[in-house]
Amino acid sequence: MNILQISSAADSGGAGVAMARLHRALNRQGHHSHTVARLRRTPQPGVLTLPEALSAGQSLVHRSINNARMQLDAWFSLPRVYRSTEQLLHTALFKKADVVQLHNLHGFYFNYDLLPKISRLKPVVWTLHDMWALTGHCAYSYDCERWQTGCFSCPLLRGKGRQLVEPRPTLLDRTAMRWQKKKDLYRNSKLHIVTPSLWLAGKVQRSTLAGALSIQCIPNGVDLSVFCPTDQASARETLGVPHGAKVLLFVAAKVTQGRKGLAYLYKALHLLRQTKELVVLTVGSAGRDLDEIPGYEQIHLGQLTEESRINLAYCAADLYVLPTLADNQPLTAVESLASGTPVVCFDVGGLPETVQHMRTGYLARCGDAADLATGMRMLLEDDGLRARMRSNSRDFALAHYALEEQANRYVEIYEHAVHTQRRLAEGSDL
């Protein structure tokens, strides 16, 4: 089967990494997956940027036009300025595809006005990695429920909300127009929706996408032969982490984003007061930008791109702390469990589906730094409990997050989408 996957990033960010892993798994199974994205970190077979897919050189003029279009979209919310979306439909890559799989359409590159046309030409499977498709702007709505009946006067585009909102806030609040536009487009589109969490699937069923041809939940998988338990002493020696310390891991790729909850981690560490024994291990390009935590040793590993080395970071840690304030199914939580490392996090979004309270980690009340500290202290002080959780974490990952199983389930959806498209074209009842 030929699958064309489209997203804003090819191999970075949660959606990009999930797409890249699925792309490789599908190809290993003998399918032909190609991915097209606005951004790509490293060249890989079958992974193209939009200019490459369109056979367009990345000249200075081309980049300047693209940057101007991005600014128009950022200022005035005008996704139709991206002509490359229309051009992609005329490529051999699109024409040969049996199925088009969409991922993140936000990211200043995609004209979603063309969704009805794309879904008439090809069966479309759309994997949602956040709530953006359901709202007038926001990837996560937090406590706001306006997306169910119609966005307007967005509280996240004003005042302190601008520190939390994703994608980046526009100058004008056009959420009412964008929400209505999406509603009209979805009504005229034939879409199969996939979410990595039941939490997000529930949101879809209460949204303007509730009338999709199908709504299914398929958790993101990981390569369980790469993300696997490794001797902790060996992992620490390789990474230069002290052997006798208790080690807490924090992935810090986007510490400046308020949603990641770094402020709550600082508060929780202050409450722990285990300054002599605890080492804070950070992974991510922004790790060195973290404020120093008085009394705690901090080790910054930088941005790790090799999955085997990322696995070592999880294995070197006693626990992984994820104080995110809103999330769907964070890949880092899945990776940590697959590596046998318990997770301490807030009970938000899809995390309660991934982290089993007191079995594979600790679910703290959202926004409660004291409860987060309680979970961290409990796991750090009880070696027996932590050992049981390490075993439970790996077992849970083996049962739920095999990458090959994820690919198999997607193939079933692709086949269903192709069959449905054919029946619709013939005018038959589904």
Image (cartoon, rainbow, N blue to C red):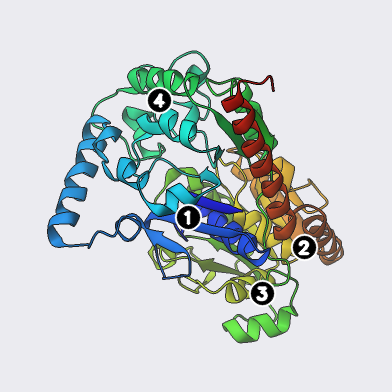
Disc on res. 316: 3
Mark 4 lies on a secondary structure that is loop
Mark 3 lies on a secondary structure that is helix
Give the amino acid at mark 3: Ala
Mark 2 lies on a secondary structure that is helix
Disc on res. 196: none
Q: Which residue is mark 2?
A: 381
**Quick check: can you spot residue 429?**
yes
In the displayed structure, would residue 345 be above or below residue 174? Answer: below
Q: Which residue is mark 4?
A: 136
Quick check: 2 left or right of 61? right
**Foreground: 105 or 296?**
105
- Give me the C-alpha separation between circle 2 and circle 4: 45 Å
Give the amino acid at mark 4: Gly
The first of marks 2 and 3 along the sequence is 3
Marks 1 and 3: in contact by CB < 8 Å? no
**Foreground: 238 or 27?**
27
